[in-house]
Image (spheres, helix red, strand yellow):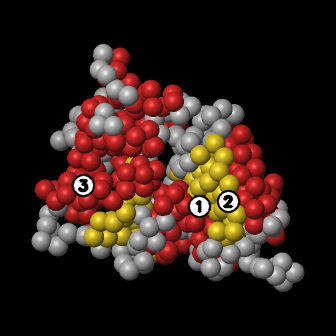
Amino acid sequence: MERASGPPLRGGIDLGGTKIEAIVVDAGHEVLGSSRHPTPSTGGPEAVAAELVAAIKDACEGAGAEPAALQGVGVGSPGVVDEATGAVSTARNLPDWEGSFELGATLSRELGTPVFVGNDVQVATDAEFALGAGRPYGSLLGVMWGTGVGGGIILDQKPWLGRGGAGEIGHVVVKIDGRRCPCGRRGCMEAYAGRAAMEARARQRVEKGEKTDLFKLMKDRGRTKLTSAVWAKALDRGDKLATELLDEAVEALGAGIASAQNLLEVEAIVIGGGLGVRLGEPFVRRIRKAMMPHTFNDAHPPDVLLAGLGDLGGALGAALLVSRRLEGEPAPVAVASSGGGAASAGDAPVGDAGSGGDGAETASTPAAGDSAPAGEAPGAEDVPSAL
Ligand SMILES: [Zn+2]
C-alpha cells in the first residue's frame, strides 16, 4: 500500500464490558490491523480511555500506520453517548463510570486525530445494515445479545435514535412485576436474557444448593465472569442449570423482540452480540420460533438473521462512523446536548471543528447540562407497574 500518498485508513474501537476490540481498516472496510485488550475493571473512565489508546495503537502497528495518520477513529461505547460532543454518561457496564466523561475529546488529544463516539449497539447495527446481514433491507432491528441486551433501529435506511436513547429493547417489559433487572426496574427482557443477569441468577441458585458446571468451567478458563464461551460449553455438556437459564432467555427474547416488531414492523431482525454470535444459527432459529406466539402479523413475520460480521461488527461499525461523519452526515441529535450549534466550550476537537450549521435543529431539551444520571433515583424500591 502506498503510504506516501496516504491511504485513507480509519480506526474503529468496540468498547465492551469485558474486552476492547480495536481495528484499522482501509477504504474497502478491509481489516489491516487489529488488537484485543481486556477492559480495565478499576480506575474509571481515565483507565478505560488509556486502554483504548493502547489498543488502537497496537492495531495501528499491525497496519503499519501512525494513529495521527488515520482519517479518524470511531468508538462504539456503551451508555448514553452525546454524538455531538463525544461525551459518555451512564455507562453502567463499565467500571466506576459516574457522571459524564469527555471520551471523544480525551482520545482525540492522545491520538492526534478526530474521534467520533457512537452508541455501541447502534454502530454495530449500522455495520450489519451497511456491510453485514442487513444489507438487503431498508429497515431493521439489531438485537445485540451479550452482557445486556441492546437494540439498534434502522428505519427507512436511517438510524432512529429518538432523542438519543432509542433502541433499549433490553428494557422492554416481558413480565409485570417480574425479576429485577440490572437497570433497577422489574420484568425487563434483560433481567431474563442478559448475560450479567443470567450469571447473577446462576449464582443465587448455586447458593441454594443447585449443581452446575458453569463456575468450574469459568475457573478452568481463568475467567471471573461467565463469558459467552463458558455458557456455550456448559450447554454442550448438557448442564441442566445452564440449559434452563438459556431456555428462559430465549422465551424472553421471543416475547420482547416480537413486541418491538409489533410496534415497528421492520423487514428484518439481526441477532448479534457476544452470546448471539457464540450460540449462532441454532439459537437464532429458536428465537424466531419463540417470537411467533407473540407476533401480531404472524402471516408475515420479519426475517430473523444471525449477524453477518461476527465479533468484529462493533469495531467495523465504529470505523464506519468515521466515514459517515467525514462524509458530512450530521451527528444525530443527542438529548441534552445543551443547546444549539457545534461545541459550546472551546474544547471540542471531536469531529471537524467547522461542521457547518447543522446544529440549528438540535432540539435543546430543557434538561440542559448532561450531568443528569443522578436524577433517576436508582434505588427506588417501588417501581410502579402502571396498570
Ligand atoms: Zn431493565
Q: Which secondary structure, mark 3?
A: helix
Amino acid found under the numbered disc labelled 3: Arg
User: Pointer 3: what residue?
Assistant: 286
The numbered mark, 2 or 1, whose residue comes first in the sequence reads: 2
Task: Give residue 103's position: percent from left, percent from top.
Answer: 68, 51
Residue at position x 25%, y 42% from top?
247
Drawn side of residue 145 relative to residue 54, left or right: left
Q: Which secondary structure, mark 2?
A: strand
Along the viewing direction, whichever of 318 and 246 lies nearer the viewer? 246
Task: Give residue 181's position: percent from left, percent from top.
Answer: 36, 36
Task: Give residue 83's position: percent from left, percent from top.
Answer: 59, 61
Q: In this view, does 386 lie above or below 35?
A: above
Task: Give residue 236's position: percent from left, percent from top.
Answer: 34, 42
User: Pointer 2: what residue?
Assistant: 34
Examine the rendering and report whether any part of residue 73 can be seen: no
The numbered mark, 1 or 3, whose residue comes first in the sequence reads: 3
Q: Is residue 147 above or below residue 23?
A: above
Q: Quick check: is the Cβ at mark 3 less than 8 Å away from ligand 1?
A: no
Which of the 4 quarters of the picture holds residue 270? Answer: bottom left
Drawn side of residue 319 relative to residue 145, left or right: right
Q: In this view, does 122 lie above or below 245?
A: below
Where residue 315 is drawn, which disc sits there? 1
Residue at position x 54%, y 72% from top?
361
The CA distance from mark 3 to mark 2 is 33 Å
Crowding near pointer 2: few (<14 within 10 Å), some, many (20+)? many
Quarter of the image that includes the N terminus: bottom right
Which of the 4 quarters of the picture holds residue 173? Answer: top left
